[in-house]
Image: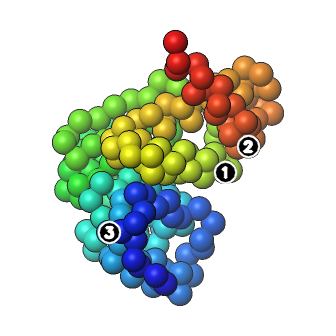
Amino acid sequence: INTDTEKFACIGIGPGIGTGDAIQKTLLHFVANCSSPLVIDADALNCLAAVKDSLKSIPPGSILTPHPKEFERLFGKTANDFERIRLAVIKASELNCIIVLKGHHSFIATPSGNGYFNNTGNAGMARGGSGDVLTGIITALRAQQYSSRDAALLGVYLHGLAGDMAADRLSKEAMIAGDIIDHLSYAFLSLVP
């Protein structure tokens, strides 16, 4: 696999890649030799979780986007949500990365020790593929030269806002991940005065 990544502002990796031995070995080699920030989700998180020391090799400024179970695989069990949030802040600082802890009011932890709760999104977004859409949004923003922190904050906000717009139009019960994409342009436009 080509690891000459200097020309890329950001690389999104994880959704749908699988977790087999060959995939895991290739991914670990890629991550260890990558110089560009990564947005790491889904199967890539699970591959990294299987080899704990591999987290130390992620490029600075990378963005991890685990849901609570993936977070547990990466960093271990916590007693409650407060402990999980505190651990996310600690790990973001240790790894010099952003951690987007997905869930109701997703939490974004930064290497500086700051944390942010997102106030957009709804239960209708708890569908297969919704996290993949978030990975794409954050990757696209980071590739447009937003800082990792700003790409994560804006990406999570827009993802949730597009989901809220989709729910208003279609209902939470009928939403699918593609509906978030369909409403993303409206979410962007709503931010412009």
Q: Position of residue 31 (x, y in %)?
A: 38, 73
Q: Position of residue 72 (x, y in %)?
A: 40, 56
Snapshot quadrant of residue 38? bottom left
Identity of the amino acid at label 2? Gly
**Mark nearer the N terminus (3 vs 1):** 3
Identity of the amino acid at label 1? Gly
**Relative to 48, is 189 on the left or the right?**
right
**Mark nearer the N terminus (2 vs 3):** 3
**Mark nearer the N terminus (2 vs 1):** 1
> In this orientation, which residue lies closer to the viewer: 9 or 67?
9
Q: Position of residue 132 (x, y in %)?
A: 60, 52
Disc 2, SS: helix
What kind of colouring is applied to the model shown?
A: rainbow
Q: CA distance from mark 2 to mark 1?
A: 8 Å
**Relative to 187, is 176 on the left or the right?**
right
Disc 1, SS: loop
Identity of the amino acid at label 3? Ser
Snapshot quadrant of residue 95? bottom left
The residue wearing badge 3 is 35
**Relative to 160, is 53 on the left or the right?**
left
Q: CA distance from mark 2 to mark 3?
A: 31 Å
The residue wearing badge 2 is 178
**Relative to 27, is 80 on the left or the right?**
left
The residue wearing badge 1 is 129
| Residue at x 32%, y 69% (from the top left corner) | 35
Q: Is residue 122 above or below residue 7?
A: above
The reply to whether callout 2 and callout 3 are in contact (CB within 8 Å) is no
